[in-house]
Amino acid sequence: MIDFLLWGGGGILGSYNLIIASSLIIILSFFFGEISKRTNIPAVLMLILLGIVMKIGLDALHIDIDFFPILEVLGIVGLIMIVLEAALELELKAEKAIPIAKAFTVALIGLMLSIWTAALILNQFIDGMDMTKAWIYATPLSILSSAIIIPSVTGLNEVKKEFHIYESTFSDILGIMVFYFLTGQLDAAHGGGGFAEFGGNVVLTIIISLIASYLIVLVFQNIKSHTKLFLLIAVLLLLYAIGKKFHLSALIIILIFGLLIANKELFFKGFLSKWLNIKEAEHIYEGLHVITMETAFVVRTFFFVIFGVTIVLADLASLQVALISLLIIASIYAIRWILLRIFMGKDILPQLFIAPRGLITVLLFYAIPKEAEVAGFKPGILLFIIIATSLIMTFAMIADKRRTGKAVQKANSKPIGYEAWEAPTIEAVSETPKDSGHH
């Protein structure tokens, strides 16, 4: 009877009610995005808050749903779409070499130092957290969220905006690779080959990825059907799943395909250029860009809402959660200040404070293997760090906007190159004609 009341046609969780709820969540997510553009408050926070409100409502109705299977599927699709979306944004051009190199260096060093520092903190304060497990738990907490950063930096100047897009994209990709390398070490401890095996695995995956990516482009540019883009997504999902079954670094397949289709002129040079249909390949790229953005939007929406539903709010009241979170947050900005001063000079505002954690943090947390789980780690640490870093970024962006606005206002009040000027007047000179008496 209870199941019927919950899941029946007219039940609380009936088909139509679920459709209504899902539609409302997506509509609200769109408006959260618009509010975020105007206020710099990350939409992520609003989605998590929506999830918390929904949790209160479900508890009031005594409804208990296991959301973790949904989170797992959303997590896999979300990772693939985020990596693909990030790869499609990367332009590999000669003039971008220095900005890309700087962003890559800051992302890599910042990621590794943040993981190491966070691992030391977790190892020190959480019972049962050895250093191997601490590194696994620290990795999600150390990855920048491109899903939050990229929409938030549109108002910055071109150089700073470009840096943040590259840095957050590299942080996502490198962080995911480090995470799966570390979880792979759990198997390596039972007879695997450790780093050497991982290196060989990566090289093999790159070779397979390049071959597969060239074949996909060559085949799909000749398909005339209008439904080929979702077919392409299905092929990429299939390759990812098969890669995971064979213990390959499957996300590299997605990354390399995205880089190849986004930089087709670079990859199809020399004799390969005659095989490329530029017009069709460009059509595939544009369509894929739209699909990945739309899909990532939907996945992000439901993931953060469900994350909000699964949060145990009592964890936030824990002194241990607050202490661990604040120490990790302090280490994040200390490391970031040092790196930005070395690589970017003195002008590091608001870049210093643009270091939010978000979707990747939560996705990877739920991907931690059972054998690496530590009962003493409270998910409230994730929520604390996500909310704190997002709010710090919000206040920094608002302060920067005000500072920029004041500078523009001051410049407009004192126009350069203009001054009050009055045309000179010519005084009339009275002269007596010399020949006045000779008319």
Image (spheres, grey):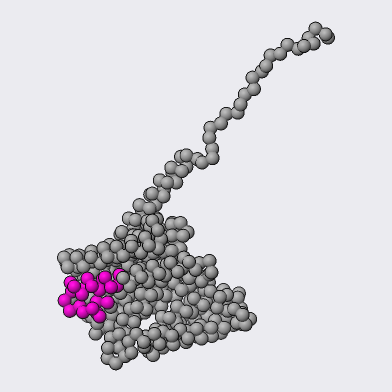
206 inside magenta stretch: no
x, y percent for residue 119: 25, 74
Q: Nearer the viewer, residue 166 or 284?
A: 166
Task: Name above or below for residue 40 compared with residue 369.
Answer: above
Of 112 and 375, nearer the camera is: 112
* Residue 423 position by quadrant: top right
Quadrant of residue 369 within the rendered picture = bottom left
Q: As drawn, is 184 to the left or to the right of 322?
A: right
> Residue 150 at x, y = what percent?
41, 64
Which quarter of the rendering shows the C terminus? top right
Which quarter of the rendering shows the N terminus? bottom left
> Which residues are drawn in magenta?
114-135
Q: Look at 39% across and 85% down and name the residue there.
A: 199
Compared with 83, 243 (above or below) is below
- Identify which residue is drawn at 22% across, 71% down: 121
Residue 118: in magenta span: yes
- Asked where in the image residue 173 lies, by quadrant, the reply is bottom left
The residue furthest bottom is 191
The answer to whether 376 is drawn above or below residue 24 in the figure is below
Residue 102 visible (yes or no):
yes
Q: Main secondary structure of the magenta part?
A: helix
Residue 11 visible in the snapshot: no
348 with respect to 186 (left or right): right
Q: Position of residue 51 (x, y in %)?
A: 28, 68
Q: Residue furthest right?
A: 439
Q: Farthest residue toward the front?
A: 342
Residue drawn at x 37%, y 71% is 108
Horizontal side of residue 323 vs 276, given as left or right: left
> x, y percentage for residue 344?
41, 61
Q: Is residue 328 above or below residue 130?
A: above
